[in-house]
Image (cartoon, rainbow, N blue to C red):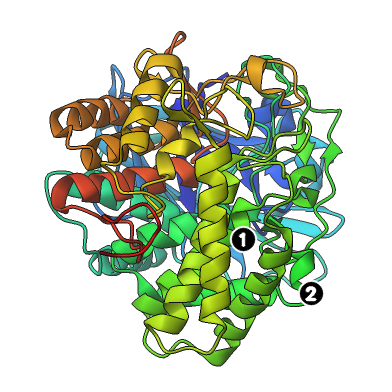
Amino acid sequence: MSRIEDYAIIGDLHTAALVGKDGSIDWLCLPNFDSPACFAALLADPDAGRWRIAPDGAECCTHRQYRPDTLVLETEWKTDEGTVRIIDFMPPRDGVADVVRIVEGMSGSAKMRMDLAMRFDYGHIVPWVRRSRSGVHAVAGPDSAYLSTTVPVHGDHLRTVAEFTVEEGDRIPFVLTWAPSHLKRPREVDPEKVLRGTQEYWKEWSGRSRAMGPFRDEIQRSLITLKALTYMPTGGIVAAATTSLPEQIGGPRNWDYRYCWLRDATWTLQSLIAGGYTEEAAAWRSWLLRAVAGDPADLQIMYSLHGARRLTETELDWLPGYENSAPVRMGNAAAGQFQLDVWGEVLDGLALTRNALVGDGDEAWDVQTAIMEQLEKIWQEPDNGLWEMRGPRRHFTHSKVMAWAAADRMVKGVRNAGLPGPADRWEDVRDRIHADVMKHGFDTERNTFVQSYGSKELDASLLLIPRVGFLPHNHPRVLGTIDAIQRELTHDGFVLRYRPEASDDGLPGKEGIFVACSFWMVEALIGAGRQREAEKLFRRLLDLRNDLGLFSEEWDPDAKRQLGNTPQAFSHFALITTAMQLHHGDAHGSDAPVEGDGSGKKR
């Protein structure tokens, strides 16, 4: 089985496919990110569905790359007889979903094999396949798929296969098109035409970027990856393209990330705005206002792509899981958790969007006001925290800090933007939260903030305290927290998000290094004036990406491999904001002060 870092992503802004170094598409959900997979070999074996094209008998490719500033993937093999390239992409969708693969002869000749095993409903259903005028047509229940190609194909043990030779100069297309089974066959695309259109789309999108400086290419690849995780019809942003890739090989910490976390989407939004992409900000705001419509007391931490709230967690027991890491899950029970910090992230994100866009409507402010009024009632309650712990609720320091940030942004909306609201009352709430955190969330003996009130444990989220403006970067308590985390919460120089064995998170097993947390440390070090140390850690983090510049959620510092769902928005937006800060100062997009007396009031 391929390692997690062996996968590339291609997508059409509705869904995404993972393509391995061996030329196999091992994961694809159709028609949307959160639909059942038709290729699920990633979580089992080839019998669960995959689509491989490669030189006959070859395994890992020789080289691969994205075409600059695009999501068009090129994979090359050099064989004894010749060199062949496969161009993989998904055209931005205009109706139905297409996966296009063009086999290009570069030199000499190469014997090729195409092996297509479609398995709908996460590998559970083998479709009925029959020949069509240009390939095959597969159908099962609501799903229908058409393979079109110029080479002969035939059936072999419930697979569709082809053996062919590609010569120098040849370009042999394969197009897989999905459509609802009750509709007529959709139009066939011209592979070369849609290749040009797809490349032009991504080139134009990348051309609007404000990324610059020594890390411009790294920033832009991460921006493209975040764009690939957006669902164009609604503006929602998924946390990752996959489900159930493990945080520990063989362990049970396997979750479905194909949904829209308010927190993740808000931080992704900050990165996109910093990169110059305000259209995405407007679309996200529209999605958010629809998703959270109703009683603010019912605010969830995550929603579906379309804003649905019921995300029932189910185990798919016929799939053994990636490298036998079970269970495989669909849905996410964390949707029902109470996570106080999300309220702050949402109000911070809406404030950021208001500052980035001209003419923020009354509807957005009305929603913010309703959320703030609910927050006034609940900020003193314990919650499940940023990391969705399934153990007992507690008073997480980060959660309280984000409640402070919520009140702070609302006060500024009234004081600075002239919006209506009880600024004096909200200012009082803000100050009371600040005093509460300073009194109960800090360990005076060790000179560090702690994970939760009364606890001795540390948490990487404490590094965000200066980022949101709760305290200035050079405040003694911030500096003490940085030192404590470096001393007690790192492995191989990288920051753990917390210690599972000591934090009572309600789950067995361990996890790897959560990549974003070390980027937070880089930002904290920059704020503390430790630039050289920050740059050294940042460059080490860049080395954790795969050969295409992609991060998953976590890193195993002992086995030296990626862990968790991929590609992970959390990791990529952290790279973007950190790289921009290294280049030209604060790039958070937040309106928080960077210096002050610790009360949140500017001097």
Q: Residue at x 45, y 56 (%)?
A: 268
- The answer to whether one can see residue 583 in this image is yes
Up the image or down, 431 lies above or below 436; here it is below
Q: How many marks?
A: 2
Q: Is residue 209 left or right of residue 179?
A: left
- Between 437 and 235, the residue placed more toward the observer is 437
Mark 1 and mark 2 in contact (Cβ < 8 Å)? no
- Residue 195, picture quadrant: bottom left
CA gap, disc 2 and disc 1: 14 Å
Q: Residue at x 48, y 88 (%)?
A: 419
According to the picture, the residue beneath numbered tag 1 turns out to be: 343
- Between 234 and 108, the residue placed more toward the observer is 234
- The answer to whether one can see residue 162 in this image is no
According to the picture, the residue beneath numbered tag 2 turns out to be: 295
The kind of residue on which mark 2 rests is Asp
In terms of secondary structure, where does tag 1 sit? helix
Q: Residue 221 at x, y = what percent?
A: 31, 48
> From the image, which quarter does the N terminus lie in?
top right
Q: Residue 495 at x, y = what percent?
A: 42, 24
Up the image or down, 601 lies above or below 83; here it is below
The kind of residue on which mark 1 rests is Trp
- Between 433 and 587, the residue placed more toward the observer is 433
Q: Residues within 10 Å of mark 1 (few under 14, many from 20)?
A: many
- Between 559 and 126, the residue placed more toward the observer is 559
Q: Is residue 209 left or right of residue 47?
A: left
In terms of secondary structure, where does tag 2 sit? loop
Up the image or down, 201 lies above or below 128; here it is below
> From the image, which quarter does the C terminus lie in?
bottom left
